[in-house]
């Protein structure tokens, strides 16, 4: 996570904190991001969005 800019980390951290405080159970869909990145039309957008970061932050707050 050291490579993430502060703004991106903060953007993922605030909503994950909000989710943990508001709900007892949080469920994330298990997407096959590795397979989705193989689609060259979507690869850059998926990688730029850091889809796994909010999930990691939320799991760490439990």
Image (cartoon, rainbow, N blue to C red):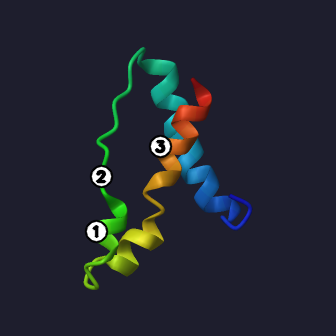
Task: Tell me the crowding category of disc 3: few under 14, some 14 to 19, or many 20 or more residues within 10 angstroms, Cα based.
Answer: some
Q: Residue at x 29, y 67 (%)?
A: 35
- Asked if marks 2 and 1 touch (Cβ < 8 Å), the reply is yes
Q: Is residue 44 left or right of residue 56?
A: left
Disc 3 to disc 1, how far (Cα)?
17 Å
What residue does disc 2 label? 31
Question: Circle 2 — which element?
Answer: loop
Residue located 44% across and 65% down the image: 49
In the rendered image, residue 11, in percent from the top left (x then y), is placed at 55, 52
Q: Position of residue 56 (x, y in %)?
A: 54, 43
Mark earlier in primary sequence (3, 1) = 1
2 or 1: tag closer to the N-terminus: 2
Q: Which residue is mark 3?
A: 55
> Does 40 appear above or below 54?
below
Q: Residues within 10 Å of mark 2 (few under 14, many from 20)?
A: few
Q: Circle 1 is placed at which residue position?
A: 36
User: Which residue is at 61% across, 33% downward?
Assistant: 60
Please give the name of the residue rendered at 68% of the width and 58% of the height, measured from the top-left corner: 1
């Amino acid at each position: 996570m050291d490579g993430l800019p502060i703004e991106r980390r903060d953007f993922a951290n605030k909503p994950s904190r909000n989710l943990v405080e508001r709900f007892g159970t949080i469920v994330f869909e298990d997407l096959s991001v590795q397979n989705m990145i193989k689609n060259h039309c979507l690869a850059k957008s998926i990688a730029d969005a850091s889809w796994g970061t909010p999930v990691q932050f939320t799991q760490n707050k439990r």
